[in-house]
Image: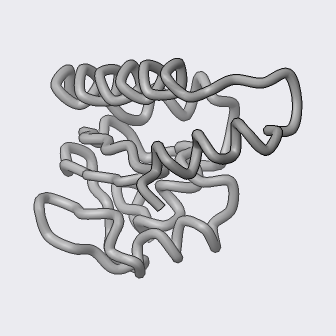
Amino acid sequence: MSDDLLRLDRWLWFTRFYKTRTAAQAAVNGGHVRVNGERARAATSVRIGDQVQIVRQQSAYELTVLAIPARRGPAKDAQACYEESPASIARREQQLAELRRDRLQMPMTKGKPDKHTRRQLRDRKGR
């Protein structure tokens, strides 16, 4: 195997986007990962300079591959293997801010929701 190529599922696992290689394979097979704009398979080879788009937990990442790691190492080493586009970072931060704002509008209780709070939650969801 060449040093400048690596399977996509291994690259995603090495760069710590997924906890297990199996989870990375499932994400790729589920269509949540694209390489250079095209839907990829787990065995797709990733090269330096490739554009990788990932949708993970409702968050979208647009990455450029900077390096091919030799192993799954510390997070600092993993982050050095890719660069995220500024537009991707801005979109994700905006999405997180919207989620926080929505959570603040929900009725709050100290513990488990009581009968009254459950009704408010159901009404808010429209059920």
Image quadrant where one finds the N terminus: bottom left
Left or right: where 87 falls relative to 48: left
Return the residue nearer the eye: 74 or 17: 17
Tell me, what colour scheme is on the image? one colour
| Residue beneath the point at 26% across and 52% down | 53
* Image coordinates for residue 73, horizontal then vertical, percent: 68, 38
* Image coordinates for residue 22, horizontal then vertical, percent: 64, 73
**Extreme residue toward the front, this view:** 116
* Image coordinates for residue 40, horizontal then vertical, percent: 27, 74
| Residue beneath the point at 54% across and 65% down | 24
Left or right: where 20 falls relative to 47: right
In the image, residue 106 sits, relative to residue 8, either above or below, namely above
Left or right: where 100 falls relative to 63: right
| Residue beneath the point at 78% across and 44% down | 115
**Extreme residue toward the right, this view:** 111
Label total for image: 0
> Residue 39 occupies which quadrant of the picture?
bottom left
* Image coordinates for residue 29, horizontal then vertical, percent: 41, 81
In the image, residue 73 sits, relative to residue 20, either above or below, namely above
In the image, residue 7 sits, relative to residue 69, either above or below, namely below
